[in-house]
Image: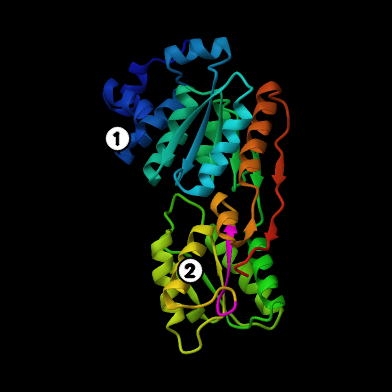
Amino acid sequence: MAQATVYEVARKAGVSIATVSRVLNTPDRVNEGTRDRVHQAIDALGFVPKAEAAARARKMHGRIGVLAPFFTFPSFVARLRGVASALSDSPYELAIYNVDSSSRRIGWLASLPVTRRIDGLIVMALPFDNEAADRLVNHDLPTVLIEFSRPRFSSVRIDDAAGGALAAAHLVRLGHRRCAFVGDSDVPDYALPTSEFRLEGYRKALAERDVTLPDCYIARARHGLDTARVAVHALLDLPDRPTALFAASDTQAMGALKAARERGLSVPDELAVIGFDDIDVADYIGLTTVRQPLEESGRVAVDLLLSRLADPTRPAQDAWLPLSLVRRSTA
């Protein structure tokens, strides 16, 4: 059967050849309706760009792609460091594709399997639908997921709710009854609401210990140190202000510490603070936190991906990484 051409794709989608090229190379610059028509035509015709067909015959591009949101956040930087270290002795270089909108997520997940500029893909904390999953599988692009799972794909995960439970158990063990929470608001629709998962584990574990988490003790703010600081000030304005606080990230915990300092509150005597992640600075500032193995998650994802590249018949695996509470001076 003859290989479909870009002309046939353009004709079937009712667009120009230039538009097909833009969909393949800069998908975020094409409106969603046009992009969908082009992708449907590509799927229907089984189109593979000529240069990529030749590259596939050679079997190797020498590049592993990472699709990631918030890649400047400390937790994502740590994960990327793990990926980079695991690839350092391999024949692959690292290519990072930033996702800052639903359009970019959809566009990259649709174009990367077709253009195949990469040999394998790691998707960090980005959920995707059945159509995107089918495209990755049908175009034989080995893919590993971090913080998200789907049938047919290997994944690396943690139990966010269990992390929240660790924080709750520690605070209650210290004698706290007025326990608050600060987490994320305005989570983009292309990302995972990990803050909410951590909150639910925290709330449930508190309830199991006969401690109520009232709505007024739950603060949400756009992710960041200063926004968390403002949110925590609102908690500290309450008539019965909390004596302890769990933050959904170390960044937000640092915002809480700054608010406490601005109030002249002693930490941990007047306000105990626990974070989540154990980023590099946490040890430096003495932050008690729930440690997730960030760099290890990147390394494990690479190991799973390289194993799949070496043996395409290898079954998908789910790797669960353990969480632990690191006690320092803030709680």
The residue stretch that appears in magenta: 269-276
Q: Is residue 250 visible?
A: yes
- Mark 1 vs mark 2: which is more N-terminal? 1
Foreground of the two, 189 or 176 = 176
Q: Amino acid at mark 2?
A: Ala
Asked which quadrant contains residue 186, the reply is bottom left
Could you say where residue 58 lies in the image, as x and y percent from the top left? 56, 10
Asked if the magenta segment contains residue 271, the reply would be: yes
Near mark 2 (Cα within 10 A), the count class, few <14, some 14-19 or many ≥20, is: many
Observer-side mark, 1 or 2, equals 2
Between 287 and 222, the one lying in front of the other is 287
Q: Is residue 284 magenta?
A: no
Q: Is residue 32 left or right of residue 234?
A: left
Look at the magenta stretch and give its main secondary structure.
strand
Q: Residue 70: x and y, percent?
A: 44, 47
Which residue corresponds to mark 1? 29
Callout 1 secondary element: helix
Give the residue pinned by disc 2. Answer: 256
